[in-house]
Image: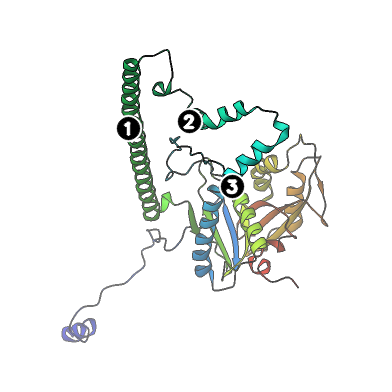
Amino acid sequence: MASESKSTTAGTNGKKRKQRYISHNKAPKKKGLYPIHPGLEGFFITCDGGRERQAANESLNLIDSFYEELVHRGDSGAKLGQTPKIPLNKKTKFTYSDSSDEDDKDDDPKDGEDDKDKQGIHADGDANDVSSANTTVDPCEQEGNVDDKEKNSACQKSQAVEGDQLPLKKQCLGTDTLKCEHAIHDKVEKSVDKLIEEELEELGDKSKRRFLNLDSGCNGVVFVQMRKRDGDPSPTEIVQHMMTSVASTRKHMSRFMLRVLPIEVTCYASEDEITRAIKPLIAQHFPVETQTAHKFAVLYDARANTGIDRMKIVNAVAKSVPAPHKVDLNSPDKNIVVQIVKTMCLIGVVEKYKELAKYNLRQLTLAKA
């Protein structure tokens, strides 16, 4: 009997099998992406069913590129690689006119000049040209009032001063430009190194990434979270810039992405939670004290949730907008997007929804008929 029990417990190779059981006192390990939770900002992206992974990778690259373009679009000023403008010493050269022109001027009866004046002009022509080029008079060319010895001493002093000053100016200019170039070059190298280090840290650590893909829990839906920092544009500005640029260029930028909607508020899909969480968003886009009242409409859509009443949510969102603004379903200025995904509600505000093909990248890139 003992031999039979040993044969049943032992395997073919004579080794015992490991006991496999489920531990009910331990929480299961989470695998994959984190789900959507309240208090997020990001982008709601639709795609073809089964292409969520490809669409997520594509959306991260595309959103990051438009974010960088929007951030660096307003930068102005001098470039770092350019050297400062320095005034240079330029020499002016004078060209003498032809003899034919001078003869015509001498023969002109309107001048009313004597022969003496003409001779004085021709004789002193060189001196006048030199004096026009140099504001100071050369002591070597002065006549009278100075003896020969004084003339020689003055000429030597002026030549010595000119010979000493010009090289010094050139040397100073050369050293200044070299110092500026070295300083600018060092700043550029340091800034580039710091930027590369920051990007590597963001790529390595998920907590430091600006854009992160989260699990939506629905087929054909991708959610990209944005960790907004001080001075960063909002998801609404990024999506608006993306759609306007795609509509103007009509260039194919995505293969798997369909519709991109900005999300500024996430909360649980209940009437009380939505009315509480939407207040700061409404105050931002629909202020009470305004000279121009906006017309708005509510765009509602639900996925994997059939137990919620559509009209209750729509009425709760519409009632939260203050009185100067009115509802207009035909031609609204702004649209309030409400997306229900399982037990979560995603809310955002978009402009020119119908004009921009309902924010569908594939429809925007199609050629006009």
Q: Which of marks 1 and 2 is nearer the N terminus?
A: 2
Label 3, on which residue? 234
Q: Nearer the viewer, residue 342 or 240?
A: 240
Residue under circle 1?
167
Q: What is the distance, in whole Å, between disc 3 and disc 2 at their CAs?
A: 66 Å
Question: Is residue 19 positioned above or below 312 on the image?
Answer: below
Regarding mark 2 in the picture, which secondary structure is present there?
helix
Whether tag 1 and tag 3 are in contact, CB under 8 A, the answer is no
Of mark 3 and mark 2, the one earlier in the sequence is: 2
Q: Which amino acid does label 3 sit on?
A: Ser
Q: Which one is nearer the viewer's eye here, 243 or 229?
A: 243
- Spatial CA span between label 1 and label 2: 22 Å
Q: Where is residue 310 in the image (x, y as percent from the top left)?
A: 73, 58
- Nearest to the eye among marks 3 and 2: give it: 2
Dot label at residue 130: 2
* Mark 1 residue type: Pro
**Category of crowding for the residue at label 3, using alpha-carbon neighbours closer than 10 angstroms: few (below 14), some (14–19), many (at least 20):** some
Q: Amino acid type of disc 2?
A: Val
Mark 1 or 2, closer to the camera: 2
Asked whether the beta carbons under mark 1 and mark 2 sit within 8 Å of each other, the answer is no
Label drawn at residue 269: none
- Looking at this rendering, what residue extends furthest in the front direction? 115
Q: Can residue 369 be seen in this view?
A: yes
